[in-house]
Image (cartoon, helix red, strand yellow):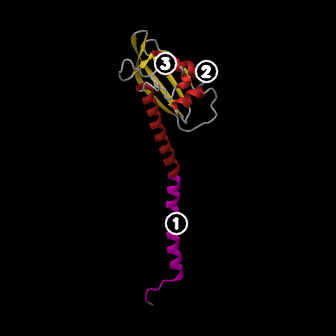
Amino acid sequence: MKAQISFVEFLTAMLIFITFVGYFSIQILMFIPSYINEVRSENLRSEAFQISELLINDPGEPLEWNLNFKDANRTGLSDHTQNKTNLLSGVKILALDSECQKNYDLVKEKMGLDHDFSLILIDRKTDKPKIENCYPKSITKFRQVNITIRRVIAYEEDGNINYGEMILQVW
């Protein structure tokens, strides 16, 4: 009887092996959905921050896009005449607010976004919004992940520099 095992021992060993493989497979399959959701969340967070960075520190293309929004290739709110970081143009803020109220989908297209977004810009001295109606009028898609980016900004209005907060939500 060299290296022989009985059929019962073989079945017992095989059953133990299949049990361990099944257990670890189920554990891995339970982990994958939460991992994928976290990856999506981080991708969306990265995109939201990039959008906020473009809005705050990019003057847009062309520089005077606020005169004719339909000709804009890129909408940035930075004041190109001052050339300062995080300083927004009051004229561009008003133009974006006006365009968001009229045609949110065009603003979304000009910003080059695949996701829906909401943009609020609040003056911190008066706590009054400068941009408040920039969101989709009807929300058709619901996503589990909603990312909120808050940025401190300064903006020029009537020759004065005011400060505020930009709140950008992307979903």
**Which residue is found at the position 56% from the left and 39% from the top?**
144
Q: Are marks 2 and 1 in contact (CB under 8 Å)?
A: no
> Residue farthest to the left?
84
Q: Earlier in the sequence, mark 2 or mark 3?
A: 3
Whether residue 49 appears in magenta in the rendering, the answer is: no
At label 1, the amino acid type is: Thr
- Residue 54 appears left or right of 15: left
Location of residue 85 in the rendering, given as x and y in whole percent from the top left corner: 36, 23
Q: Residues within 10 Å of mark 1 (few under 14, many from 20)?
A: few
The mark nearer the N terminus, 3 or 1, is: 1
Amino acid tagged 2: Lys
Look at the numbered disc 2 and give the secondary structure of its residue: helix
Marking on residue 19: 1
Q: Secondary structure at mark 3?
A: helix
Chain-order first, disc 2 or disc 1: 1
Residue type beneath disc 3:
Ile
Are the two marked residues, 2 and 3, in contact with CB atoms closer than 8 angstroms?
Answer: no
As drawn, the label of residue 93 is 3
The part of the image, by quadrant, that contains residue 63 is top left
Residue 63, label in figure: none
Which residue is identified by label 2? 102
Q: Nearer the viewer, residue 101 or 32?
A: 101
Residue in the foreground of this view, choosing between 104 and 67: 67
Residue 79 image-quadrant placement: top left
Dot 3 surroundings within 10 Å: few (below 14), some, or many (20 or more)? Answer: many
Which image quarter: residue 171?
top right
Could you say where residue 62 lies in the image, as x and y percent from the top left?
Answer: 47, 25
Q: Write the start and end of the magenta stretch as one range.
A: 2-31
**Nearer the camera: disc 3 or disc 1:** 3
